[in-house]
Amino acid sequence: MSEIEAGRGAVAPVKTREGGEGLLAALALAGGAGVLAAFFGAPAVRFWANVLLWFCFYATVGLGALFLAALEHLVGARWSVPLRRVAERAGSLVLLAVLLGLPLLFSLSVLYPWTRPEARHQPFVSGKLDGWLNVPFFTARALATFALWGLAFAVLAGLSLRQDRTADPRLTLRLRRFAPAFMALYAVTVTLLAFDWLGGLEPAWYSDIFGVYVFAGSFLAGLSATALGTVRLLSRGRLPGVERDHLYNLGGFLFAFLVFWSYIGFAQYLLMWYANLPEEVFYYADRAQGGWPWVMAALALLHFVLPFFALLPRDRKGDPTLLRRAAALVLVAHLLDLYGLIFPSLSKTVVFSWPEAAFALAFGSLLCLWMRRAQSLGADMPVGDPFLREGLEFRL
């Protein structure tokens, strides 16, 4: 028996029909009605800020999941091969992000102060307008970014799905060659997402490591989505052969990047606090008033303290129940992190009422529906991958 045939015969996942889609669709429609009401009844800046929030959430989660899939090809990892399809499915969220990003291009004059005439009279903004912060160049960068995200998903997930059908080992080599290119693509587009879409809300502010901060949150969110999807499939008997050791590695990655995200966030704050430059510290001053300190405290608790101590004991990293809870908590905290990056730039006080609740209901339900439908993308494991059996045999 060939290595590929052995890999294909190692699994026989059974896809079970799952209910609840009707309820999710009803919730999405109810939330959509609220979103429509917000379009007509809420201030335009508030409506588009919510769209930006969910665009960034979908994009960062999807890109983080694709990063995890590409990382496997780049380093030749074996343990993660049985879990790669979960990451590829979560990576499809970049397509949903693109659908949200296109209409956002019509909101630039509402959200971004650098589009207004008075920006030319601001000392820390005027020098950026001609070379970088202008609508035509911003739009071109955004469209190029969206195209690259679609290309990355088409290659990483498309070739993997084709390998399910053909069992062609040459596709593994093609994916391995594409992985370094994707890493460069990922670095550039996540940095653009950070500085254009998020940092552009405060054009006078600048941080050298803001792109790294957004990258850390993106990979952590993609890793959490992969862990959550893996545990969910395991509980339904759809990942035969995946053991606690595989979950332990996921939990270890999650634990490590919790620390990395926290380190980058604190380092950015500490350097700006120490330098005390006017063009830097106002960013944190805005988040130290009007109720925002409570949001920042909640972020520290949910995005670091609770999951850190939950995953700290060695035997808990491979516990499927605890891993599911920690991953879900990190995803919620990631959404809160993006909320704290966007809304304080637009409002001096905490903003949360029916428009935000409607968006959460609509886009949260849409997210669940999208991921349910994504379960139909190929087999639950990459059955054509020649290294699948070796991945299933992985033990610590």
Image (spheres, rainbow, N blue to C red):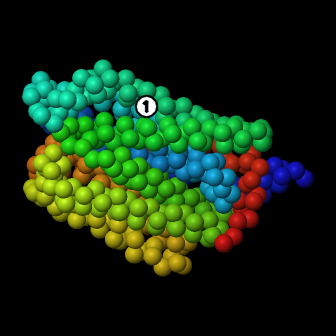
In terms of depth relative to the viewer, which is nearer, 189 or 267? 267
Q: In this rendering, does residue 387 appear at all?
A: yes
* Residue 197 picture location, percent across and down: 30, 37
Establish if 89 lies above or below 232: above
Which residue is found at the position 45% from the left and 73% from the top?
A: 311
**Residue reaching furthest right?**
1
In terms of depth relative to the viewer, which is nearer, 120 or 316? 120
Which residue is found at the position 22% from the left and 65% from the top?
A: 297
Establish if 75 lies above or below 106: below
Q: How many labels were placed on the picture?
A: 1
* Residue 191 picture location, percent across and down: 38, 41
Task: Count neighbours of disc 1 (C-alpha within 10 A) and say few if under 14, some if 14 to 19, many if 20 or more.
Answer: many
Establish if 184 lies above or below 272: above
Q: Quadrant of the C terminus?
A: bottom right
* Residue 353 picture location, percent across and down: 17, 50
Which residue is found at the position 35% from the left and 71% from the top?
A: 306
**Residue reaching furthest front?**
275
Q: Indicate left or right for 144 with 67 as reference.
A: left
Establish if 330 lies above or below 193: below
Secondary-structure class at tag 1 = helix
Which residue is found at the position 28% from the left and 56% from the top?
A: 268
Q: Amino acid at mark 1?
A: Thr
In terms of depth relative to the viewer, which is nearer, 257 or 10? 257
Q: Indicate left or right for 149 with 388 as reference.
A: left
In terms of depth relative to the viewer, which is nearer, 235 or 167? 167
Q: Indicate left or right for 67 with 160 as reference.
A: left
* Residue 346 picture location, percent across and down: 16, 42
**Residue reaching furthest top?**
136
**Label 1, on which residue?**
145
